[in-house]
Image: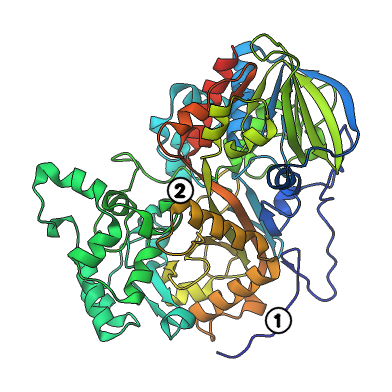
Amino acid sequence: MSKIKRRDFINGTLMVAGASMLPYGCSNPKILDTIDPLYYPPALTGLRGSHIGSNTHAHARSWEGKSDWGPTTDLKEEYDLIVVGGGLSGLSAAYFYRQKHGNDKKILILDNHDDFGGHAKRNEHHIDGVMRLGHGGSQTIQDPQIYEKPSQEMLANIGVDIEGFEEAYDMGFFNRHKLEPGTYFNKEAFGVDKLVKHPYCNYPNFMEGLPKASMSHEEAASQAPLSEIGREQLLRVLNGGVHLLDVPEEELEAYMDETPYYDYLKNTLGVNDPGVIRMARYSINDWGSGGTDMLNMTLARDGGALGFSPVGKSEMVLGSKYIHHFPDGNASMARLLVNNMVPGVSEAKNGAEIVLSKFKYEELDKSGKNVRVRLNSTVVNVQHGGDPKSSDEVFVTYINDDKSYKVKGNGVVMACYNMMIPHIVPSIPEEQAAALKLQVKVPLQYTTVGLKNWRALSETGVGFFMSPGNYHQSVLMDFPVSIGGYEFTNGPDDPCVLQMVSCPLGTEGAPLADQFREARHKMLVTQFKDIEEEVRGHLSGMLPDELFNFDRDVQSITANRWAHGYAHPGPGDSVKIGRKPFGRITIANSDSGGYPRADIAMAMAYRAVNELG
């Protein structure tokens, strides 16, 4: 492969000679009615998610025990409710509080990031005058029919039309363009750059409308760049499954729950080839919250790991379609919640209109409004005004622009990363603090790439690539959704957004928490230029030179890194112990439900609000 001349991306967007490039807004808006009207985070590219600076003060508090940020300014602001964390759970908490106590109640939502929504992050790519959307984390309204009733009513009230996705989602897109799932083996890990039109797993099954691979297992195994022994073992795995287990039917589920997936591979199927093991470890990516080396057989089967074929829709309800997806993922839900509570932030009247609505961020934190959203504000201390059992006031200290500020609320919902709570609420009971410190997060990265066209994908006939040798373990065209005037890419000559998913792993076989910690460290020290080189090498190796040129075809890159991504529960009853109310402080976030789903985040918000009374 010829060496491609390196270009410079300015904050993730290609700087074209002679073209002007205006900033979308400052990265650090001031508080109190002074947000620049040009401030518009969704259009920022480069390193996003837990962007540079977003965790600086939180890490100083938790890692170094820092407690002194200089003089604290008492803003003399009083609220009925203060919400710590502006993700889906925090925004839902504010909504449910208004539903219960009235729209006249004063609420302040504080978030350490430069945008609201948490993992529900909107990525805008502007390509040759066309806007293409992608999601930066929270993806889809999964199984909306099993959402708890308050959450279902909330979605309806803010303008989400669940039935409308049946028409908005183009089920025929992939068949119409003859796109199948495939696997890219890179030279670094497998000795050769090779594309095979077979996924070797069922992870692509989450993409509704994507056809099954037309290639047989025998042909797929023969084409894999493995040794002869490796190909023989791979075929055994592809033809494997639960039917090979010599276990009585009444004991099967218990056996699978107790048996590690790797034991099944190595002992039942006799697999020891490192290439096959690598393919297996990376076969379900973010679904498994880590590598398959830490999963039992049940979880591996449900996630569609290598060797379980065919499978259903994993944890989705029987008959449910995985189509309830806005073009920017669940960022539209976050935008709808803010639109419902903050007058003047948008002119959108429903979920369809929200997609193309450009938000007025200068309206988020204006005095006189009942609900205010204050960004770039890291909460470092929350304490009652007296005895937590009787106090009716809570003081919240946060850092904005390296300055310390204090506000007062009648109650506080902690909708932030739960493991941080003992550092922020130092007076919380010792048993509860210990339980909260056991909660962890899975590091994840969702990189979106703005392409000027997708001719290379069209010609190769692949729309979803598994990549077991790469930093990003899968690459896919986004969900084909057109809604509210927004049009998904129509054909190969049109711009599109590629989604690249990375679930960084630690040392194979190490305890899960240790793996997360190791992977998190690697993620935090990785710079954007390194990610750009990863994307460059990945796409250039995967797609034919005559069809794809990185310098010519890539317009922009947004790397949404989440060092603290999916919720992963601690052992035993630690989740239930950790979320107990503490005086006028209650705890939300999907962490407090022990599972990384949007409906869990909403349900935990509803519980936390009701615990405040």
Mark carried by residue 6? 1
Q: In x, y percent, where is residue 59?
A: 70, 47
Residue reaching furthest front?
Answer: 430
Q: Position of residue 570 (x, y in %)?
A: 46, 40
Image height of 17 relative to 606, above or below: below
Which of the pair 468/513 is nearer the observer? 513
Q: Residue at x 37, y 62 (%)?
A: 175
Circle 2: element type: loop
Closer to the N terminus: mark 1 or mark 2? 1
1 vs 2, front mark: 1
Q: Disc 1 marks which amino acid?
A: Arg
For residue 380, side relative to residue 268 (left or right): right
- Which residue is drawn at the image coordinates 54% and 75% (left, top)? 538
Disc 1 element? loop
Residue furthest toward the top? 390
Identify the residue at image location x=70%, y=70%: 529
Q: Name the residue under label 2.
A: 169
**Could you tell me how far apart the alpha carbons at marks 1 and 2 are, in whole angstroms?**
37 Å
